[in-house]
């Protein structure tokens, strides 16, 4: 087991990893920008190192400074959390070159899954169902029209190196294709420095289903069930559930088994999430995230397994602590992402939190690094906390969520709490009847 882990992140995920390390008796080092000097994870860590000014490129994305912090403090491993450098293959390779363990998969696996076209090819080879579309990058309009005609309209054009909805355009008919192709290429080039795009069949009312997987790096793989992340705004997740209200036990076992076998065959090490669009009983691979997800607590709630403990165990060479038959699903869990944003316009709302009170009681968990008097800096992601609620079934979970949202108090800034109080009372949400377009349509009606 590791002696000292450096946590290369900030906010609630840095605090989440820090707590897991303390439970395992591992010394902790956190890095921080000057803007985060008073952050909770900095206060609670055994050691902290300031690695630069507020801009991420000068601090949390500064690989040289993070490696130097490891060497100064004697950290023998790095946990990257999510975001920032968590899916940076170069960072993983550099750490290995310095005899520091990257708590995550190999740089090669990060590279494969970071390229959307190569990821799709790999998924197909591993037996994972994929969305019908081009086998690789689309190079000209004539080829695009041929592929679109074969798979049928509507189609979606996506950036190969994309993410967060950038470089993504829908063409409903052939007349829309040229401009969609040009726009997607332009956005992809500007956002990612790579204008390669590919074409897929555009599903009309799919759900976003993701499967939590783990590999030990030696040919063993397991799945921890699925999460439903269909409530999204501009391709950003807002509300997540485990298990999905849309799947039955047979479907859950089928797709989970496919994913666990794929991870084993790939020789993958650590945590990963295989993401699908799901429509009319069929799953279609869209991407794999080679890291811990923001929404991992709902999986922990229904399995009782600490996924960060598992990450650390696997990275240290200890292998997986559970077999597939050991993983049982208990009840239902929902996570709401609480952001420092206007609940209607979603404009960021940095500032000082004058009062912060979290809900409590059976089945309630709040992951947050903020506190009363904490000043939210304007430089980073607006996520300030996650409310995770667990119940014996979805009905109990929803009732508990309603109560927890009523208790949650954040004063001094605007947050998305009012949005969730609206959603928990909506009939479609109560019935689990929603898809990836539902939230944006709902918000449009509210304007």
Image (spheres, rainbow, N blue to C red):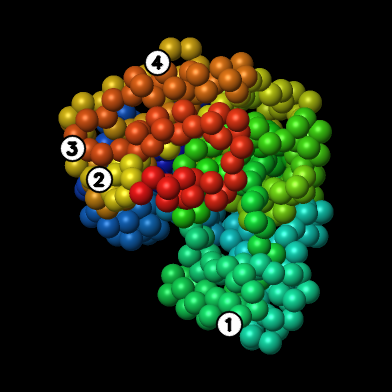
Label 3 belongs to which residue? 352
Label 4 belongs to which residue? 360
The answer to whether the residue labelled 3 contacts the one labelled 2, judged by CB atoms less than 8 Å apart, is no
Q: Quadrant of residue 390?
A: top right
Q: Nearer the viewer, residue 319 or 183?
A: 183
Q: State the CA–CA distance, disc 1 to disc 3.
A: 47 Å
- Mark 4 nearby-residue class (10 Å; few <14, some 14–19, many ≥20): some
Q: State the CA–CA distance, disc 4 to disc 1.
A: 53 Å
Say what secondary structure mark 3 lies in.
strand
- Mark 1 nearby-residue class (10 Å; few <14, some 14–19, many ≥20): some
Q: Is residue 311 left or right of residue 122?
A: left
Q: Nearer the viewer, mark 1 or mark 2?
A: 1
Label 1 belongs to which residue? 178
Q: State the CA–CA distance, disc 4 to disc 2.
A: 25 Å
Label 2 belongs to which residue? 349
Instruction: Residue 221 in the image: state x and y as whole percent.
Output: 74, 40
Instruction: Residue 424 in the image: state x and y as whole percent.
Output: 47, 29
Say what secondary structure mark 4 lies in.
loop
Q: Nearer the viewer, mark 4 or mark 1?
A: 1
- Mark 3 nearby-residue class (10 Å; few <14, some 14–19, many ≥20): some
């Amino acid at each position: 087991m590791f002696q000292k882990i450096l946590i290369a992140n900030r906010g609630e995920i840095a605090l989440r990893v820090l707590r897991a390390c303390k439970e395992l008796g591992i010394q902790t080092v956190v890095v921080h920008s000057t803007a985060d000097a008073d952050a909770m994870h900095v206060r609670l860590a055994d050691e902290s190192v300031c690695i630069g000014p507020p801009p991420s490129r000068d601090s949390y994305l500064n690989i040289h400074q993070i490696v130097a912090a490891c060497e100064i403090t004697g950290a023998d491993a790095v946990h990257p959390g999510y975001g920032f450098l968590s899916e940076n293959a170069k960072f993983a390779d550099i750490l290995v070159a310095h005899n520091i363990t990257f708590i995550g998969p190999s740089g090669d696996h990060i590279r494969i899954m970071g390229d959307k076209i190569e990821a799709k090819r790999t998924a197909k080879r591993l037996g994972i169902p994929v969305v019908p579309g081009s086998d690789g990058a689309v190079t000209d309009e004539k080829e695009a029209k041929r592929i679109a005609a074969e798979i049928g309209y509507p189609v979606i054009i996506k950036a190969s190196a994309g993410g967060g909805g950038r470089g993504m355009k829908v063409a409903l008919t052939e007349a829309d294709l040229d401009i969609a192709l040009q726009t997607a290429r332009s956005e992809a080039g500007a956002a990612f420095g790579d204008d390669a795009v590919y074409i897929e069949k555009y599903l009309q009312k799919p759900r976003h289903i993701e499967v939590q997987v783990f590999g030990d790096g030696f040919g063993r793989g397991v799945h921890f069930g699925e999460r439903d992340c269909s409530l999204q705004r501009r391709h950003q997740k807002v509300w997540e559930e485990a298990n999905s209200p849309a799947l039955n036990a047979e479907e859950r076992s089928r797709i989970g088994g496919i994913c666990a076998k794929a991870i084993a065959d790939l020789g993958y090490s650590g945590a990963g999430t295989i993401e699908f669009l799901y429509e009319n009983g069929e799953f279609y691979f869209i991407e794999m995230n080679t890291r811990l997800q923001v929404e991992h607590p709902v999986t922990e709630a229904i399995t009782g397994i600490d996924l960060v403990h598992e990450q650390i165990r696997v990275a240290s060479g200890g292998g997986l602590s559970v077999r597939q038959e050991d993983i049982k699903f208990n009840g239902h869990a929902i996570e709401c992402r609480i952001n420092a944003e206007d609940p209607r316009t979603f404009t960021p709302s940095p500032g000082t939190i004058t009062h912060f009170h979290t809900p409590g009681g059976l089945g309630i968990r709040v992951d947050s690094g903020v506190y009363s008097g904490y000043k939210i800096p304007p430089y980073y992601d607006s996520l300030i906390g996650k409310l995770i609620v667990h119940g014996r079934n979805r009905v109990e979970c929803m009732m508990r969520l309603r109560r927890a949202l009523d208790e949650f108090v954040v004063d001094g800034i605007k947050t998305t709490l009012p949005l969730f109080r609206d959603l928990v009372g909506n009939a479609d949400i109560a019935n689990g009847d929603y898809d990836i377009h539902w939230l944006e349509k709902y918000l449009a009606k509210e304007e």
